[in-house]
Amino acid sequence: MLIKKFDKEISHAKQVEKADIKYPIEIYKHQGKWIILDGIHRFTKIVRLGYKTIKVRRVTEEIAQKTKRSDKKYKKWGTKK
């Protein structure tokens, strides 16, 4: 979604432009799928630049659950109200 709306979402576009891709993206496996825990703007920048590989740091699902957002804007982690 973020990649497709890149030009329409100015604030996201600026964050993607500033993203420092020298740092790995943090991922974890949940129900057989890899989930980005941290680094969506770096991921978007890497994809847009056409890289074939991405540096990642795998974390356990247990660690991922401990880092969930506590922001009141979200009823569930990653799901807006």
Image: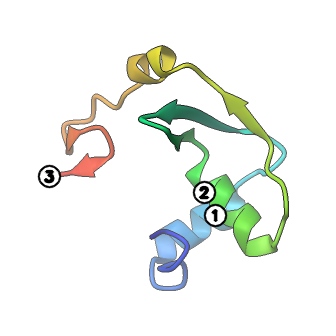
The answer to whether residue 59 is above or below residue 35 is: above
Tag 3 residue: 81
Tag 2 residue: 41
Q: Which three-letter amino acid code belongs to the residue tagged 3?
A: Lys
Question: Farthest residue toward the front?
Answer: 32
Distance (Cα) linking label 1 and label 3: 24 Å
Choose the circle earlier in sequence order: 1 or 3: 1
Distance (Cα) linking label 2 and label 3: 22 Å
Mark 1 vs 3: CB contact within 8 A? no
Indicate the position of residue 29 as horizontal and vertical percent values: 53, 33
Choose the circle earlier in sequence order: 2 or 3: 2
**Display colour scheme:** rainbow
Indicate the position of residue 33 as horizontal and vertical percent values: 50, 43
Residue drawn at x 81%, y 72% is: 50
Residue drawn at x 60%, y 57% is: 41
Question: Farthest residue toward the bottom?
Answer: 8
Left or right of 57: which side holds 81? left
Left or right of 79: which side holds 81? left
Question: Quadrant of the image for the N terminus?
Answer: bottom left
Distance (Cα) linking label 1 and label 2: 5 Å
Q: Quadrant of residue 65?
A: top left
Q: Residues within 10 Å of mark 1 (few under 14, many from 20)?
A: many
Q: Quadrant of residue 9?
A: bottom left
Tag 1 residue: 44
Q: Which three-letter amino acid code belongs to the residue tagged 2?
A: His
Residue drawn at x 80%, y 72% is: 49
SS state under label 2: helix
Q: Which three-letter amino acid code belongs to the residue tagged 1?
A: Thr
SS state under label 3: loop
The answer to whether residue 80 is above or below residue 24 is: below
Residue drawn at x 59%, y 69% is: 14
